[in-house]
Image (cartoon, grey):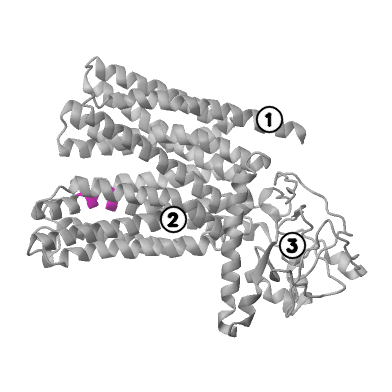
Amino acid sequence: MAQQQTFNASTPLLIHATTTTTTTHRGSSSINNNAASSSPTTTNTTRNMNEQQLLSTRSSGVVPPLPIVGSSHHHHHHEESNNKKYPSESGTIDTYDHHDSFSDLSEEDPAQSSALKKQPISRAQNLFHVVKSSIGWLAFSIVFNVLNTIVYSALYPKILHNVSVNGGSDYSTAFSITNTVTTLASALSLPILGSLVDNMKIIRASMLVTMYLGIIATIGLFFTDKLPNATSEDMTTHLAICEVVYILAMFFLRFSVMNNNALLPSFDKKNMMILSLSGNFIGFGVNLLGLLILAFTPKSVFSGDIWEITRENWWVLVFTCFTILVSFFVFLSPNGVDRVTLNPETELNSSSIIVKKKLEVPQIFNRLPKPLRGLGKIVAVCKNSFMALSETFVNWRTNTQYYHCWIFLLSYLFFSTAGTVVTIYLGPLFIDIYHFSLEQEVLLNLYFKVAMVGGVIGGVIFERLFKFNDIYVLAAQNSLFGAFTLSIFVTISLKVNRYAVLAQFLLVGFLYAWNASVARGLMSKLIPVNKKCEFMGFFSTFTYLGISITSGIYALLSKLQLPSHTLLLILFIWLIPAFLFLAILKQSLDKHADKK
């Protein structure tokens, strides 16, 4: 099959009024005429030509391979003079777009829809929409960080420890297995699920559903204390159920994070970086506050196994109930389709390009009873999703946007892994080298969280005061990160005072939080509008793969009985390829900008 020409989504394309398109009418399906075939000429009355400037692109078709460019206020509308239903050889063709769920009104009463579109939207209304959407998007950061960091990083290991001690087993082995399973499952499945979400256009709905499934699974963790513990078999079952709860909860939460990240491109590009920084500031701040509560709350609170529920599980219930309250604000998030901007009439970028997809429903589904015919569309959507995913790999080089995303992801694989691993193994390193107690490790993590919050605040200030290219910012951060990593390795090897090592680790935490925010913001600017969830799935995949790789390296170091701080030297070497891919990305972006 001949390869279609690809276009960068940010390049405006002019489609003349004579371009042949079709309008979906109730009771009939519309199609896009093939560019290679003979197209009928569209006849428009004077009234329709005047309305073209105001009607939504949800009534517009697309002539392959050119997408129609529009905005939230200025779109094109064409009426086909000959409304027919054209079945394909494989089955009935149905078309849908990003606004299908809102198209009933225009199909029933086009005049009323046109009148509604002509009503001007005030700046105050736009401002309200931006603020509302921002609150919803940021609220999710609280929900995820409370569950991920406080419940499953701080409390869950203690819950496993309580169960395993009573059962005579090693909880660390169980935690390692469950963490590996969830990490690999997320890494392999999120891009596939993301492509499906993109094709079904249910980003916000998917985020909300998976978020609440994660919350429900976490509530289930609270009730595991009511399981029987009379025998060693009961303890083993108890431990296994806790592992299953962890696997389910973390999978759903990571799925919802992917959807939340995919909503970030709905905002103006100039606001994406600030929102990314603000989201991490709120998330890390909540983590710090939660850990402070756990560290300094008197031991008498929730003591004595009230109702035979352990103290840790009572805290799980408290924090989970808090996330339920915050979760209602998440409903304010953008829908993932409409632009969230103060200037919709001038906003013209990749997000304003609406490309219709074709659903080819196999004829066999038309023979089923009417209630079951909808299965045909489900099959067609799944087929389109896998085709879209494969197209991402096939056209990785010829499509400029895909190429930029892949190059950035390769760089991200190296520099994000280095930062994440330092964060994960900070405690174990100090325990192994300086023989920190568990109480000292808690304080160490608190200091590191403070440094991360400071890093995000510093990033916000820097973003407001200076306007440097994001790639240069990432390169500078990674350079400093590599320098500190190597310095810490040398400092530990020379047996310098541990407080000097701690100070350098805090600077690493400062850079890591800032770096993670900038990386997410840059990724949001690069991804194609019709593959937001898919590429954010890959964004998560590369993170989890990097963690898995370096976790294996750490295990190998332990097996070979090498000093644990050798991992820092390995991370310094691991970081080097990130600069190469950032340079390639910058060169390609500059070359593409010159062509414009």
- Left or right, 87 with respect to 294, comes to right
Instruction: Examine the image and state in which quarter residue 316 appears.
Output: bottom left
Which residues make up the magenta segment?
149-157
Q: How far apart are marks 2 and 1 (CA)?
A: 34 Å
Residue in view at x 39 percent, y 58 percent: 252
Mark found first going from the N terminus, 2 or 1: 2
- What residue did someone put label 1 on? 590
85 over 183 or under it: above or below:
below
What kind of residue is marked 2?
A: Phe
Residue 234 screen position, x and y as percent: 13, 63
Residue closest to the far bottom: 369
Which x, y percent locates residue 154?
Answer: 25, 48
Residue 396 on the magenta segment: no
For discs 2 and 3, the disc positioned in front in the rendered view = 2
The quadrant in which the C terminus is found is top right
User: For residue 128, which quarter of the picture?
Assistant: bottom right
Residue labelled with disc 3 = 57
Q: How far apart, in angstroms, are the residues tagged by discs 2 and 3?
A: 30 Å
Residue at mark 3 to residue at mark 1: CA–CA distance:
31 Å
Q: Do the residues labelled 3 and 1 touch (CB within 8 Å)?
A: no
Magenta span contains residue 150: yes
- Looking at the rendered structure, the secondary structure element under dot 2 is helix
Q: Residue at x 65, y 71 (%)?
A: 361
Label 2, residues with CA under 10 Å away: few <14, some 14-19, many ≥20: many
Left/right placement of residue 476 relative to residue 175 reads right
Q: Let me know if residue 473 appears in the view.
A: yes
> Which three-letter amino acid code belongs to the residue tagged 3?
Thr
Q: Which mark is residue 175?
A: none
**Residue labelled with disc 2:** 255
Circles 2 and 3: CB atoms closer than 8 Å: no
Tell me, yes or no, if residue 472 can be seen here. no
